[in-house]
Amino acid sequence: MSNPLQSLLDSGRPLVMGVLNTTPDSFSDGGEFVDAAAAARRAEQMLEQGADIIDVGGESTRPGADDVAEADELARVIPVIQAIAAEHPDTVISIDTSKAAVMRAAVSAGASLINDVNALQAPGTLAAASNSGAHVCLMHMQGQPRTMQQAPTYGDVVSEVGDFLRHRVAACVDAGIERSRLLLDPGFGFGKTLQHNLALMRGLPQLAAQLQLPLLIGVSRKSMLGALLDQPDPKKRLHGGVAAATAAVLWGARIVRTHDVAETRDALRVTAALTAAGDTGPKPS
């Protein structure tokens, strides 16, 4: 059976991934959707708003986050994935996890995309992803969530992120995961300062050209926007997030991961229409 994500990627339009955190401690919406029924209702709402993908996560990866036991993560995400898959069998469901057992259970429950902030580096995850048949998103992160923002350093953040992702792609291919199943995420805010994040955003055209795989971008409500806007409340960073999503798509991103589906979807529809209108307009350098 074909992966439902492939037809979306083949459409050529920018895609919207809606964030569904089933955690009590996520930085923006922690505790809002820990109940499976509430999470399923939130998924329904995001689909109505135009989400192409629902990304279900049961472990917070915010800076300083603690690890979550495998059993707890499974209990948080599997009932939600099952509920979404039962009501919307054609929906692309993503599992946001770095644990092999959670990957296997989530795909069995109906997920067709594995979104791993650790880029399949944990024991058993390469094999789990390879055997699943699912698409996989590999993300760059310097360090681990507990410590990643303490003192991130790079010589050239764009080159180093690109090198890391290229090496992880090679590891995946060696493990039997076809390149056509892979997506890449530069990891905004994961072991990066504001200046690193800005350089990485400006470097998206370089990464897209070099890596030749779909780029997934997650900047929604993140601290980089808070710093730029002088806005400490993550839920009040909507407009900055939409602007960043639009820039990311113009510079090569194919998928935007967001908490604010309706607003991001509208912005990307307009962006797609304007860029499809002709090739005579200005291009990002």
Image (spheres, rainbow, N blue to C red):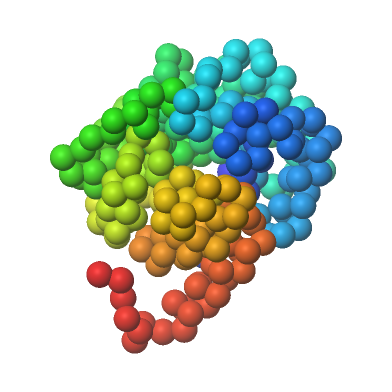
Image quarter of the C terminus: bottom left
- Quadrant hosting residue 123: top left
Image location of residue 224, percent across then percent down: 42, 49
The one nearer the camera, 209 or 236, is 236
Residue most extreme to the left: 155
Q: Disc count in the image?
A: 0
Q: Is residue 114 visible?
A: no
Quarter containing the N terminus: top right
237 above or below 30?
below
Relative horizontal placement of residue 15, taking residue 88 as reference (left or right): left
Residue 245 spot, x, y in % from top left: 48, 60
Query: Which of 129/223 is in front?
Result: 223
How far across and down, in percent of the image, does residue 21 sit? 65, 36
Residue drawn 29% across the image and 46% down it: 196
Residue 208 placement: quadrant? bottom left
Left or right, 193 with reference to 231: left
Residue drawn at (48%, 64%) of the image: 243
Residue drawn at (60%, 41%) of the image: 28
In the rendered image, the vertical position of residue 44 relative to residue 274, given as above or below: above
Q: Is residue 216 left or right of residue 38?
A: left
Above/below status of 250 relative to 124: below
Picture coordinates of residue 143, whole percent (x, y): 34, 26
Look at the picture and state if 256 lies above or below 119. below
Dividing the picture into quadrants, the one containing residue 147 is: top left
